[in-house]
Amino acid sequence: MDESRILANLEAKHPGEKEYLQAVHEVLMTIKDTYNQHPEFEQAKIVERIVEPDRIFMFRVPWLDDNGDVQINIGYRVQFNGAIGPYKGGLRFHPSVNLSIMKFLGFEQTFKNALTTLPMGGAKGGSDFNPKGKSDNEIMRFCQAFMTELWRNIGPDTDVPAGDIGVGAREIGYLYGMYKKLAREHTGVLTGKGLEYGGSLIRPEATGFGALYFVKQMLQTMNQDIKGKTIAVSGFGNVAWGAVTKANQMGAKVVTISGPDGYVYDPDGISGEKIDYMLELRNSRQDIVAPYAQKYPNATFFAGKKPWEQKVDIAMPCATQNELNEADAKQLVANNVLLVAEVSNMGCTPEAIDTFIKNKIVYGPGKAVNAGGVATSGLEMTQNAMHLSWRAEEVDEKLHHIMTSIHEQCVKYGTEKDGYINYMKGANIAGFMKVANAMLAEGIV
Ligand code: NDP
Ligand code: 2IT
């Protein structure tokens, strides 16, 4: 593989798409040795094909705000790779959304979905719509306008969107309602649905729960127990909530959460009613965590700071991409962090990852650690296709099995000569091999 040439070409073709180029760079650098042992991949130009999306939809989303003024946003759906199954991946509504972010997320999703053991291709979509401060009616009108354009390009066997940042149960409800009206079909075209209309038990918790199942297994390889460990979590959204809940159930102590305003450190641990309060804060749509420290005076609020400066055993970024940089990583290493598990997609910068790997700190990449979310979406698709619902225990057990399998794949492909498990390498190679072999079998399409 001539990765320098491939990356230079990609940069020339897609200038400025920095998150997308960052994600591709990471994958190519970690798979190249394995790739080079497969001349059949080189001949079929698998890498050159896998780095470009199958197709991209970009569209205008006009809607009326509560004052009757016309608002215009951009909508996206990147169908990145459909080699192993119908396209699958979330929708993100956040003002930072652009083509580069959509493409990096779709690219990562392709390998993540391959790791889940389920037949799902990779996709991502969303809009630069900012949900902050919007009324319920505005959210509904926006979702309806978005779906009015998207619906022709998705379907239960074509492309199945779900939630991501800014898209939760409420938004999925409005999107589903509009899809149903247009298509006149009740099908599993979206996941993360409410339980009353085809949703799956455990899906809301799945990303965070799956992440903790994975962390537990990472710790086991180090002969460590999760009980009594301190954890720094960033964010205070859906994923952070699931992670904090399961960490408590496993006997760990979560001492931080964060928002765009800063972070709170609670030495007593964020547990019980404090977790409900975190949800309340999130639902208030004010995007601040500062009030937590007023309500619980033992906690301290650090304005404009990130949780990574605290001394903890485990760091779990749960907010957004590139939220943990080199300086943060050095601080964590200096504080003797035991492991870092990325729950947000591409939560760590490349320099931060290098710092962890150089210092032999065990680091789990998002595409492995957070795969429980999309995996449970896959289980929701299965239940919809079978027209039945599984019990919570059944879904949870399947989620457990899937996370165990992902961990095994990472160990298989990522264990180095000295015994250090390079989970990034393991996840990238395992995900890549599955998609590459499917592409090879399907010919030049
Ligand atoms: P939520 O919208 O529920 O929460 C997102 C959190 O991240 C909020 O606290 C949010 O605060 C913060 N955040 C978002 N963008 C930024 C930004 N640019 N700068 C600083 N903070 C930011 O989303 P989720 O919990 O669903 O998603 C969190 C992460 O997990 C994302 O990286 C997502 O891609 C990933 N993920 C989600 C899955 C899911 O099933 N939902 C599955 C797998 C991964 P604010 O909105 O105030 O900026
Ligand atoms: O990043 C992700 O894996 C998600 N946002 C979940 C996608 C899904 O289809 O459930």
Image (cartoon, rainbow, N blue to C red):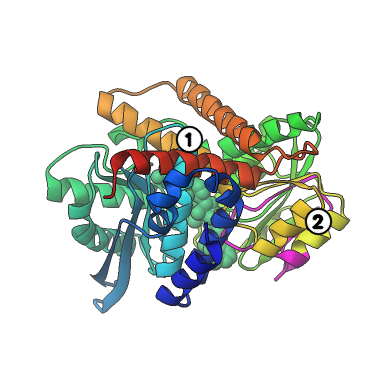
Residue depicted at x 81% and y 44%:
338
Residue 261 in the image: above or below residue 295: below
Q: Which mark is residue 116?
A: 1
Residue 275 drawn at (x, y percent): 63, 44
State whether residue 82 is above or below residue 310.
Answer: above
Identify which residue, 167 or 432, lies in the foreground. Answer: 432
Quarter occupied by residue 29:
bottom right
Tell me the chief SS of the magenta region: loop
15 or 193, which lies in front? 15
Counting from the top left corner in percent of width and height, residue 439 is at 35, 44
Say what amino acid the circle numbered 2 marks: Leu
- Span of residues in magenta: 302-327
> Which one is nearer the viewer's eye here, 175 or 24?
24
For the question of whether residue 27 can be seen, the reply is yes
How many numbered badges does the structure rendering display? Answer: 2
Give the mark, 1 or 2, whose residue is nearer the N terminus: 1
Q: Position of residue 175 (x, y in %)?
A: 28, 52
Q: Nearer the viewer, mark 1 or mark 2?
A: 1
The crowd level at tag 2 (other Cα within 10 Å; few <14, some 14-19, many 20+) is many
Vertical arrangement, residue 221 with respect to residue 274, above or below: above
